[in-house]
Image (cartoon, rainbow, N blue to C red):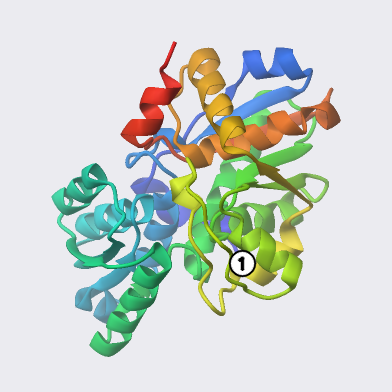
Amino acid sequence: MDFNAAEQRIRVHIRETPLKHSRGLSESTRADVFLKLENLQEIGAFKIRGAANKLLSLPREQAERGVVAASNGNHALAVATVGGRLGIPAEVFVSEHIDPLRRTRIESLGAQLHTVEGDPLLAEQTARCEAEQSGRTYVSPYNDMEVIAGQGTIAVEILRQLAQFKAKKLDAVFVAVGGGGLIGGIGWHLKSASPDTEVVACWPENSPALYESLRAGKIVEVPEKPTWSVSTAGGIEPGAVTLEIARQVIDRSVLVTEGEILGAARRIYREDDQLVEGAAAVAAAGFLKSAGDYSGKTVVIVICGGNADPALEARIKEK
């Protein structure tokens, strides 16, 4: 897969987000720590990359028919934003558990919204069925090679930006994992462009669907508990291509508690002046939990989004 070509294709539709050196995290861990600030994307999250690459790859006839997606948050925002910009009608299925503010934001972008009673995985299955019956393209949040290629453009930018800091090499990258599209794309590119870089997958203990599927060697259902990392929560779609990709690109896995997620989010807010969502804090918490292994090394933490739910934002800002 050509991630450099994908990066060039989507460049005018996204922001090249900053790679920020974290003085606080670096000094406290004795590693050279950088934050890839995808929270500063137009929609506040990395998902716009995959959506842009997918929609730009559609043949004209398919694009005119419109697309169908399923998401309770960032993916929906991404599809609605890019679809509106390209003139591609978007229909989005959400679960009944969607945050009301996110629902309003998605609708404001012009997407047609449908609510499904049940969890996000059921919304995904319903959306895919609707796409097949209507002859439209289903845009998966993760189970799509063009979407994965779009997410992998983050790694292209990281390597280019890191060179400006005159860092010798990238020793490790920490990424939060939900369906696996983000770590799949980043890891795939790094395995060829920077093969010595360790790809570290980070999960909340309360929602480790892909982690348990990797352990089982097949996609399995995993009991879900409430988590601050709402963007990574939910099951994995049967037949997802990300299972095999993740198996090939992940070098290390770290599970973090809800307390560790909240603690990491607070540190980033206080020390780096970035308000991040739970999924982004999962990656930071994963690094902090294993920081002793990275003393003297160059590390990048992917801050995948900044759309914190109101409850999490309030907890982050508590004094």
Instruction: Locate residue 288: give its quadrant.
Output: top right
Residue drawn at the location 55% of the way across and 46% of the way down:
154
Residue drawn at the location 74% of the way across and 56% of the way down:
192
Work out whether residue 16 or residue 217 is closer to the camera in this orientation and state it.
Answer: 217
Residue 309, percent across and down? 35, 37
Residue drawn at the location 64% of the way across and 69% of the way down:
243
Residue 106, percent across and down? 22, 51
Left/right placement of residue 249 relative to residue 20 reads right
Residue 100, percent across and down? 22, 46
Quadrant of the drawing holding the N terminus: bottom right
Q: Secondary structure at mark 1?
A: loop
Number of marks in the rendered image: 1
Could you tell me if residue 58 is visible in this image? no
Work out whether residue 75 or residue 10 is closer to the camera in this orientation and state it.
Answer: 75
Work out whether residue 21 or residue 234 is closer to the camera in this orientation and state it.
Answer: 234
Could you tell me if residue 161 is visible in this image? yes
Q: Is residue 162 above or below residue 248?
A: above
Residue 286, percent across and down? 68, 37
Q: How many neighbours does mark 1 have within 10 angstroms: few (below 14), some (14-19), or many (20 or more)?
A: few
Instruction: Locate residue 276: give its quadrant.
Output: top left
Q: Amino acid at mark 1?
A: Met
Q: Is residue 319 above or below residue 197?
A: above
Q: Is residue 88 above or below residue 173?
A: below
Quadrant of the drawing holding the C terminus: top left
Q: Which residue is mark 1?
A: 1
Left/right placement of residue 8 relative to residue 168 reads left
Work out whether residue 208 or residue 290 is closer to the camera in this orientation and state it.
Answer: 208
Residue drawn at the location 67% of the way across and 23% of the way down:
165
Left/right placement of residue 250 relative to residue 241 reads right
